[in-house]
Amino acid sequence: MQRFNKIIIASLGLLMMVLFIRYSPEILKLMVSLDSFRDYILSTGKLGPVMLIFFQVLQTVIAPIPGEVIQIAGGYIYGTYVGMLFITAGMLLGAIIAFYFTRFVGGAFIENLLKKNKFQWMAGMMETKKFSIFLFIIFIIPGIPKDLFIYAAGLTTIKPLKFFSILIIARFPWLLASVSIGSNIYHKNYVSTAIISGVSVLAFALGLIYKDKLTNKLSLFKKSNSGS
């Protein structure tokens, strides 16, 4: 059974990479305009929700696709509640593929990646007993790289249910904010759009500004814990 799971996860991961490489110009072109992306999704008819979920899966598995655009588009096309449902489903499915890809297939590749200087802080935090707390902090603060942490978590002994629960709870507020922005733009609620966008941009900017300080503090906390 485990061998079958490995084949399925490896196949899904490979399929995502092949599709992105093959269709990346068209995919990135669709991301330029909310209207063009909405027209494309609606043109697929009943498959629209499936296609939106697929794009969110692709974004989670392959980071270069701008996630905020897809999430905003989810609200722009389907409204806040239905859009949030589809976006969350896509994010979770993509996370499952990434997590198990590492756990079953690509562990050596991720380990080698984490040995690079710019990712060593990430590898250091994975070794602490407080890894679950670190994950929650990483996932809830905008501006900190998240997708690679999904792959990295597959190298640890964290239980899948615990990991995916942390992921959903921590990502929920900002996913909801992005989807709400899309819905408000479509319904021309510009005041609500401006308020939510302002808060989101401010949080993202603070995350970028204090990212290094935060990761350094987390690393120091990790060292003090391991030394005690």
Image (cartoon, rainbow, N blue to C red):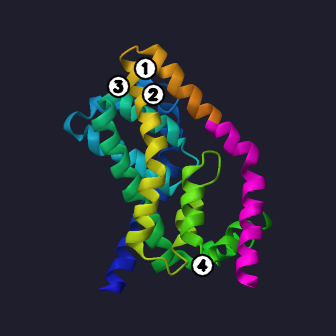
In the rendered structure, the answer to whether residue 29 lies left or right of residue 216 reads left
Closest to the camera, between mark 1 and mark 3, is 1
- The residue that disc 4 covers is 129
Please tell me whether residue 112 is drawn above or below residue 182 in the rendered image: below
Front residue (pair 158, 32): 158
From this view, report whether residue 33 is shown above or below residue 228.
above
Residue kind at label 1, given as amino acid type:
Ile
The quarter holding residue 94 reads bottom left
Q: In the structure shown, which secondary structural element does the residue marked by tag 3 occupy?
A: helix
Q: Residues within 10 Å of mark 1 (few under 14, many from 20)?
A: many
Residue 79, position as x, y percentages in the image: 31, 29
Structural distance between the alpha carbons of marks 3 and 4: 47 Å
Q: Which mark is residue 181?
A: 2
- Distance from disc 1 to disc 3, alpha carbons, whole Å, reads 15 Å
The amino acid on which the numbered mark 2 sits, given as a three-letter code, is Ile
Viewport quadrant of the C terminus:
bottom right
Q: In the rendered image, which residue does mark 1 sit on? A: 185
Q: Residues within 10 Å of mark 4 (few under 14, many from 20)?
A: few
- Magenta part of the protein: which range? 203-228
As helix, strand or loop, the secondary structure at mark 1 comes to helix
Q: Is-magenta flag for residue 152?
A: no
Question: Dot 2: what SS?
Answer: helix
- Which residue is painted at 54% across and 71% down in the image? 153
Amino acid carrying label 3: it is: Asp
Question: Taking 65 as reference, is 11 above or below it?
Answer: below
Between disc 3 and disc 2, whose residue precedes?
3
Select label 3 or label 4 by which is in front.
4
Lateral position of residue 71 relative to residue 145, left or right: left
Can residue 18 be seen at all in this image of the molecule? no
Q: Residue at x 42, y 70 (%)?
A: 162
Is residue 138 visible in the rendered structure shown here? yes
Question: Quick one: which residue is furthest to the left in this view?
Answer: 46
